[in-house]
Image: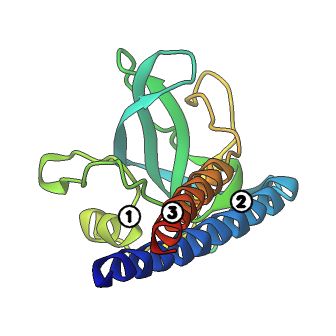
């Protein structure tokens, strides 16, 4: 009898946990919807690229199966502020050098983020998979703003720009946690039935 009550207690705790996680993912889903409904505006800034301070984000695709890399380079604005600039996608068989001289950069700003499925960067080997401003600050030896400027410039001198995009898989996660809560409730009901 005591064992069944213990199992019932565990199932009740799991149910509460799963419901809490489901509600959290529902809130995250709606937060992402709000961001997608109000994307950051495209704006412009003038300054110069630093071709010597360019890295590749490895293991990228362009959405139609072409494998390549994203070009990240340092951009110094006319006011002296240094920015990490995401210039866009290049196929592996292409080599890219940022334009020299003063340019007008069309961009939208975004905070950096790392997917839990991305491997860690290895600056010593020049291998980068995501943008870490503190890491690049040390790698380039330059004080950096922690906002990434996603270039929307196009043409022969630029890679293919990345449009504004926010992944929103949270509804699926919400339903998964809700389903697990229902499973826990079902097994709890079975235990209660045996206690009668």
| Residue 104, horizontal then vertical, whole percent | 71, 49
| Residue 78, horizontal then vertical, whole percent | 63, 67
Residue at the spot of label 3: 184
**Placement of 153 over or under 26, stated as above or below:** above
Residue at the spot of label 1: 132
Residue at the spot of label 2: 29
Please tell me how crowded label 2 is: few (under 14), some (14-19), or many (20+) other residues with Cα within 10 Å: some
| Residue 143, horizontal then vertical, whole percent | 40, 76
SS category of the residue bearing label 1 = loop
Q: Is residue 80 visible?
A: no
**Placement of 130 over or under 191, stated as above or below:** above
Distance from disc 1 to disc 2, alpha carbons, whole Å, reads 25 Å
Q: Give the mark nearest the N terminus, 2 or 3.
A: 2
Q: Residue at x 60, y 28 (%)?
A: 160
SS category of the residue bearing label 2 = helix
Q: Give the mark nearest the N terminus, 3 or 1.
A: 1
Q: Is residue 92 left or right of residue 167?
A: left
Q: Quadrant of residue 80?
A: bottom right
Please tell me how crowded label 1 is: few (under 14), some (14-19), or many (20+) other residues with Cα within 10 Å: some
């Amino acid at each position: 009898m005591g064992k069944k009550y213990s199992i019932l207690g565990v199932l009740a705790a799991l149910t509460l946990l799963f419901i809490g996680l489901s509600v959290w993912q529902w809130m995250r889903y709606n937060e992402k919807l709000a961001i997608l409904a109000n994307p950051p505006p495209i704006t412009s800034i003038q300054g110069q690229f630093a071709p010597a301070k360019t890295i590749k984000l490895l293991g990228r695709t362009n959405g139609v199966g072409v494998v390549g890399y994203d070009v990240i380079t340092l951009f110094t604005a006319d006011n002296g502020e240094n920015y990490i600039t995401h210039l866009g996608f290049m196929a592996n068989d292409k080599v890219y050098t940022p334009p020299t001289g003063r340019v007008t950069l069309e961009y939208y700003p975004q905070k950096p983020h790392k997917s839990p499925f991305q491997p860690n960067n290895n600056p010593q080997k020049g291998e980068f998979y995501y943008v870490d401003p503190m890491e690049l600050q040390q790698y380039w030896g330059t004080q950096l703003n922690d906002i990434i400027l996603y270039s929307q410039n196009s043409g022969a001198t630029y890679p293919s720009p990345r449009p504004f995009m926010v992944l929103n898989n949270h509804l699926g996660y919400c339903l998964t946690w809700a389903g697990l809560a229902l499973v826990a409730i079902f097994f709890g009901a079975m235990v209660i039935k045996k206690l009668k």
